[in-house]
Image (cartoon, rainbow, N blue to C red):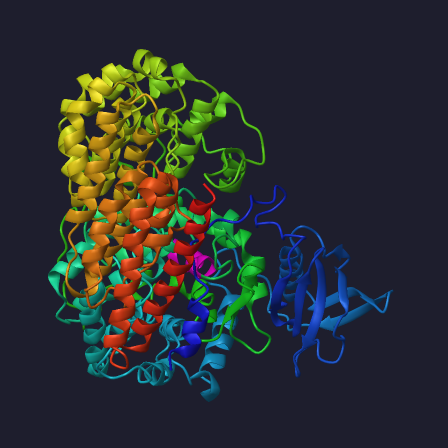
């Protein structure tokens, strides 16, 4: 049952936004060097591809539709309604033509190129009228589209799968006539068990919860309970990975938040349904995800918030989840996330899935914008009317357009009808879109503030900071001038513009404005920002100093240390000395402090050291940065080094551990440090490997990964430590799961692409005299592996046998190559 779904999900990897938005309109321009997957041109019945060079080429037509029999495979669509199609945004040209035709006479006249000659082909689509000024509410066209989609979904052939979004769409119509169809979808789930697949479980849980709260049908509860039990068993760091996992080396910690957010939503809905949910699991998930609103976008894994609007729809997902909880903290978080989604129409095809989750959750997640920002929701819907029309199918229903990266379109009851929720979300008939609790609802208790300090709520405000002035530009116009961490701005702006945008309500705008001012050397403007009464502006000033870019840390700040100490230190110190300052502002202040002169950092370390062990790893990371910045003066760093080295083993989260080890590695690379300090760091890294705890069972992969990863951060600089590493790895070979679930066991010996040279390459670097004994030990390891293979022949699982055989072959090959090189010395 889940196999087709799995095939869709396999392609979901680390997301990166697409290229910068088209200046003329509001979508990522098509890539003329790419081929786009087969897509439908709205209700016309034409299926086409976009070939390299932006040639929109007919693939087929659907029988019984307006286009049937009027086109041939290979026809190139040159114009529609007199407008050239092969512009930078062919989707927009086609979508706008559909919208205009439905609002008038229904006629679409195409100019096509067939066998080298141009000719006209006309067709007529049904006239639905224009969208109303309040669409999709109080709109005849929208109501017709909803009825057509519902009729499409309730056909027997479309009920064969448990359609997550299809079921939610039918519920969202508010019409009870569709409840039997939803029940048919729900009953296709196993009655009282869950698989170990986060994507399936999360979306299934949302549908089950909404279905029960609407109907009171208790048959949904055992399955919902099973999903919650699985959520407890597979949770780590507060979130969830793709499926069985964990794979902590993937996406910074192995978490997959686009799936994990739905698990949080499921837990909240399950509690509201009266299902017994493990409180620790609930609390950890709520804390983990609550950290992101107001700090930029919900990331993919266990790292910092990402710096682009929508974040492939994850901000809308989290807005829906937090909207289910009562209290000021949740309302503010919901509204800031929802406003972000409404403003994100510029990023329409952003993210690895292209037109996947990003498209679904924009219309769905933007309904929670604050009352004084309803015009932003209106703007988003009006700007994207063409897109929603282009996604509609000729016989009812929706498919989502694909992109060249995935070569997929997302359709059917599982995904496609997520687009339909853009038409029904404002009806507020689902709990995730703002429906009030039902007679089956139970009160869900949640902490008043699940993360941070009271003043962290300031970052969830959706009003402009004082001094912003009038709102004179639309969101896409602002970001065309600001850019984002992944895309350069497409239009120029001056210092006055950036100074104003430091007072914008959106954290992405403030950070990018601060970075722009830093790039312009605007010392006075940044110094003034640090003294601003609004902490949002102060954090933007700190980001400017740090050169903050969310994910990767810049090697240097925006200003030389002398300038930071002279112009900004007093503002940084004022923030650090405030005992009630928000965690987010303190985080920025510790990063900014790390860019000052070492002597000034040293005198402020009393305000930093305690955060080495803070429960929030973001603050551990920024405190690491401040302390390691003393590396320019070995005498200043030496007293702090023991505490930093102690953190190597204690730091279990992948991202801050990588960051700390990377900082220590930079010290090792510094030729000015003494051999004594180098030995101290190498010894600390080695102890970090040895003392890293490995938890039993499911979470054991985290410790094993952390042990291995430590190698890449010191072994290249200290090949003489390879013998100690070999001492360590020889202990692991007797572990039952050394080969099953270990992750790259042979790479301890052969190295990897991420900087670990491996024991055998270290032997080569050490030369024949010191390296030969190391190779001899590696040969003994191979012999031991061969003996293990002989003794366990036929008893070990095939996966273990294959992993052992691979390790033997790769180590043997590496030894032979190394011996040849040594022989030539």
Residue 633 is at least partly visible in this image: yes
Question: What's the magenta region?
Answer: 357-367
Return the x and y of residue 128 as percentages of the image width and height.
Answer: 60, 69
Return the x and y of residue 372 as percentages of the image width and height.
Answer: 36, 43
Q: Identify which residue, 529 or 377, lies in the foreground.
A: 529
| Direction right: furthest residue | 117
Whether residue 365 appears in magenta in the rendering, the answer is yes
Whether residue 667 appears in magenta in the rendering, the answer is no
| Direction bottom: furthest residue | 156
| Direction top: furthest residue | 566
Return the x and y of residue 605 as percentages of the image width and height.
Answer: 17, 23
Return the x and y of residue 712 as percentages of the image width and height.
Answer: 33, 44
Q: Is residue 488 left or right of residue 188?
A: right
Q: Residue at x 40, y 18 (%)?
A: 525
Q: Quadrant of residue 361?
A: bottom left
Q: Quadrant of residue 722?
A: top left
Is residue 571 shown above or below 452? above
Q: Is residue 62 left or right of residue 795?
A: right
The majority secondary structure of the magenta stretch comes to helix
Q: Is residue 556 left or right of residue 324?
A: right
Q: Residue at x 18, y 55 (%)?
A: 284
Is residue 74 shown above or below 766? below
Is residue 399 shown above or below 501? below
Q: How many marks?
A: 0
Residue 741 is at least partly visible in this image: no
Q: Residue at x 31, y 81 (%)?
A: 186
Q: Tell me the quadrant of the picture where the C terminus can be found.
A: top left
Q: Identify which residue, 55 or 52, lies in the foreground.
A: 52
Q: Tell me the quadrant of the picture where the N terminus can be found.
A: bottom left
Q: Residue at x 31, y 35 (%)?
A: 665
């Amino acid at each position: 049952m889940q196999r087709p779904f799995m095939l869709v999900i396999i392609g979901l990897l680390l997301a990166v936004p697409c290229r910068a938005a088209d200046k003329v309109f509001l979508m990522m321009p098509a890539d003329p060097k790419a081929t786009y997957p087969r897509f439908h041109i709205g209700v016309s019945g034409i299926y086409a591809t976009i070939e390299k060079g932006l040639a929109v080429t007919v693939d087929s037509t659907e029988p019984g539709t307006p286009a049937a029999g009027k086109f041939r495979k290979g026809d190139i669509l040159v114009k529609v309604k007199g407008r050239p199609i092969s512009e930078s945004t062919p989707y927009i040209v086609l979508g706008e033509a559909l919208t205009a035709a439905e609002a008038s006479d229904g006629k679409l006249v195409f100019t096509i190129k067939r066998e080298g000659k141009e000719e006209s082909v006309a067709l007529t689509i049904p006239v639905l009228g224009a969208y109303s000024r309040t669409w999709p509410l109080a709109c005849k066209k929208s109501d017709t589209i909803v009825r057509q989609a519902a009729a499409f979904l309730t056909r027997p052939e479309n009920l064969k799968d448990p359609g997550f979004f299809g079921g939610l769409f039918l519920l969202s119509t508010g019409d009870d006539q569709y409840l039997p169809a939803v029940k048919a979808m729900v009953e296709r789930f196993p009655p009282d068990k869950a698989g170990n697949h986060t994507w399936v479980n999360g979306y299934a849980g949302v549908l089950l919860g909404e279905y029960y709260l609407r109907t009171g049908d208790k048959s949904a509860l055992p399955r919902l309970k099973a999903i919650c039990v699985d959520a407890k068993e597979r949770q780590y760091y507060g979130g969830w990975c793709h499926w069985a996992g964990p794979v902590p080396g993937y996406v910074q910690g192995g978490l997959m938040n686009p799936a994990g957010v739905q698990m949080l939503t499921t837990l909240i809905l399950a509690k509201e349904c009266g299902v017994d949910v493990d409180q620790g699991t609930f609390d950890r998930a709520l804390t983990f995800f609550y950290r992101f609103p107001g700090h930029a976008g919900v990331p993919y894994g266990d790292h910092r918030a990402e710096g682009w609007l929508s974040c492939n729809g994850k901000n809308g997902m989290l807005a829906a989840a937090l909207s289910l909880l009562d209290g000021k903290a949740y309302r503010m978080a919901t509204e800031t996330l929802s406003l972000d989604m409404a403003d994100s129409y510029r990023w329409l095809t952003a993210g690895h899935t292209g037109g996947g989750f990003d498209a679904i959750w924009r219309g769905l997640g933007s309904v929670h914008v604050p009352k004084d920002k309803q015009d932003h929701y209106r703007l988003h819907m009006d700007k994207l009317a063409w897109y929603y029309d282009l996604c509609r199918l000729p016989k009812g229903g929706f498919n989502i357009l694909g992109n060249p990266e995935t070569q997929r379109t997302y359709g059917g009851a599982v995904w496609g009808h997520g687009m339909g929720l853009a038409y029904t979300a404002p009806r507020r008939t689902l709990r995730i879109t703002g429906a009030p609790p039902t007679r089956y609802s139970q009160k869900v208790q949640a902490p008043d503030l699940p993360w941070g300090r009271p003043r962290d709520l300031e970052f969830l405000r959706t009003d402009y900071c004082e001094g912003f002035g009038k709102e004179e530009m639309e969101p896409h116009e602002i970001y065309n001038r600001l850019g984002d961490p992944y895309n350069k701005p497409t239009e120029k702006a001056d210092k006055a513009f950036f100074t104003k945008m430091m007072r914008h309500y959106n954290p992405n705008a403030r950070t990018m404005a601060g970075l722009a001012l830093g790039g312009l050397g605007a010392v006075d403007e940044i110094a003034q920002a640090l003294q601003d009464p609004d902490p949002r502006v102060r954090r933007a000033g700190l980001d400017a100093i740090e050169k903050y870019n969310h994910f990767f840390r810049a090697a240097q700040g925006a200003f030389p240390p002398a300038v930071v100490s002279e112009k900004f230190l007093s503002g940084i110190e004022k923030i650090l000395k405030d005992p009630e300052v928000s965690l987010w502002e303190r985080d920025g202040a510790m990063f900014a402090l790390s860019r000052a002169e070492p002597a000034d950092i040293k005198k402020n370390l009393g305000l930093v050291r305690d955060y080495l062990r803070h429960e929030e790893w973001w603050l551990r990371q920024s405190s690491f940065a401040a302390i390691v910045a003393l590396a320019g003066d070995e005498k200043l760093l030496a007293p702090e080094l023991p505490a930093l080295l102690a953190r190597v083993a204690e730091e279990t989260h992948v991202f801050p551990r990588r960051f700390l080890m990377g900082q220590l590695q930079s010290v090792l690379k510094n030729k000015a440090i003494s051999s004594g300090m180098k030995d101290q760091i190498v010894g600390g890294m080695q102890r970090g490997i040895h003392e890293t705890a490995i938890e039993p069972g499911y979470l054991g992969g985290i410790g094993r990964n952390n042990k291995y990863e430590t190698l890449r951060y010191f072994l290249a600089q200290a090949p003489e430590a390879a013998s100690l590493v070999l001492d360590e790895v020889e202990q692991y070979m007797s572990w039952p799961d050394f080969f099953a679930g270990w992750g790259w066991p042979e790479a301890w010996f052969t190295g990897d692409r991420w900087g670990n040279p491996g024991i055998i390459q270290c032997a080569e670097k050490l030369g024949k005299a010191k390296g030969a004994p190391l190779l001899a030990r590696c040969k003994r390891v191979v012999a031991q592996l061969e003996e293990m293979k002989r003794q366990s022949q036929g008893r070990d699982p095939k996966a273990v046998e294959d992993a052992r055989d691979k390790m033997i072959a790769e180590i043997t090959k590496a030894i032979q190559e190394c011996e040849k090189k040594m022989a030539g010395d």
